[in-house]
Amino acid sequence: MSPDASVDVAVVGGGPAGLSAALLLARCRRRVVVFDGGHHRNDGSGAVHGFLSRDGIAPAALREIGRNELRHYGARVEDVVVQGIVRDGAGFTITTANGDHVRARRVLLATGTVDVQPPIAGAAQLHGRLVLPCPYCDGWEHRDRPLAVHSHADDRGARYALLLAQWSSDITFLPGRAADLSAELRATLAARGLTLDERALERVDEDHGELRLTFGDGSARRFAAFFYHLGCTAGQSLAVSLGAALDDRGGIAVDRHNATSVPGVYAAGDATRDALQAIVGAGEGAVAAIAINQSLVNDDLSGSGR
């Protein structure tokens, strides 16, 4: 894109939310550019699941299909990081890492989120294959097999372990230290047949397609997979720089039309910290696109967008 270009809508984030919004906006005959910084929450995953008509597709393949559809309508995708966004009169100026400045009447932030990964040796190398954050994405593939579950050493972690019991009756909850659990949650774990193992966790390794977990005492156990939940860090830095409000979980606060507290700035997908699913992000992108187009129509009718 040429420096000092001008568009109707700048979409920051090239995942399902951003691409879905851009597709609908392009079909509304809006000038749209998508900035994709190249980092996506599901980059390490082998497949997207629960996405109607695309169940099992590789994440990169899903994005490429979306990009090809955008090209048909003339929308652009720029593989570059957005470094800053500032208010510029009635619109915004977006500055990219390569020094370009793009002016937009509206901004959609689809900047995603980052999982807080387990601080266990070997976990990063197996992430997306045997070390997994989302049972809705990967639980079916490991159903009815021994599963390790690592989460907070409190009732939050116990509830996450109980969630995994929907996919397997052989669940070991591994908080990595002595757990501070309520008597009710301890009793529920026992009643559901979940094992609580409070030993320190040393490392995880792949062993003939399964996961070998080594404990701090040197002993080891094998599991089909290692599910974890330690929270997420939403991609909200650009929203914060624009003055957008965050919700009580640290995500970007939006209304039912995916508008943020900053006029002209919208957010969709994982950055809003709702259900972290590709199909949900795509739907939120479509909701935001409809709202954005209507706001632009309103501006044009009132003359404020001219």
Image: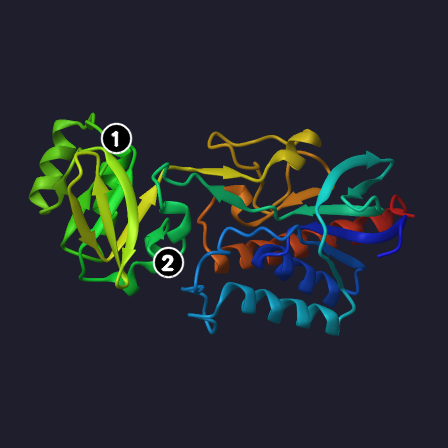
Residue 212, percent from left and from top = 23, 51
The answer to whether 274 is drawn above or below residue 170 in the figure is: above
Q: Name the residue located 24 percent from the left edge and 33 percent from the top edge.
A: 176
Q: Is residue 42 above or below residue 49?
A: above
Q: Would you say 258 lies left or right of 274 here?
A: right
Mark 2 burial class by Cα count in 10 Å: few <14, some 14-19, many 20+:
some
Q: Secondary structure at mark 2?
A: loop
Q: Is residue 273 left or right of residue 183?
A: right
**Residue under pointer 1:** 153
Identify the residue shown where x is 18% and y is 62%. 144
Task: Tell me the quadrant of the picture where the N terminus can be found.
Answer: bottom right
List the residue tagged with mark 2: 129
Instruction: Report x, y in % for residue 85.
Output: 76, 38
The tag earlier along the polypeptide, 2 or 1, is 2
Amino acid under disc 1: Ala
Relative height, residue 153 to residue 285 (above, below): above
Residue for point 75% across, 49% down: 295
Which label lies toward us, 2 or 1? 2
Q: Is 220 or 55 nearer to us in this picture? A: 220
Name the residue: 55% across, 43% down: 271
Q: Residues within 10 Å of mark 1 (few under 14, many from 20)?
A: some
Q: Amino acid at mark 2?
A: Arg
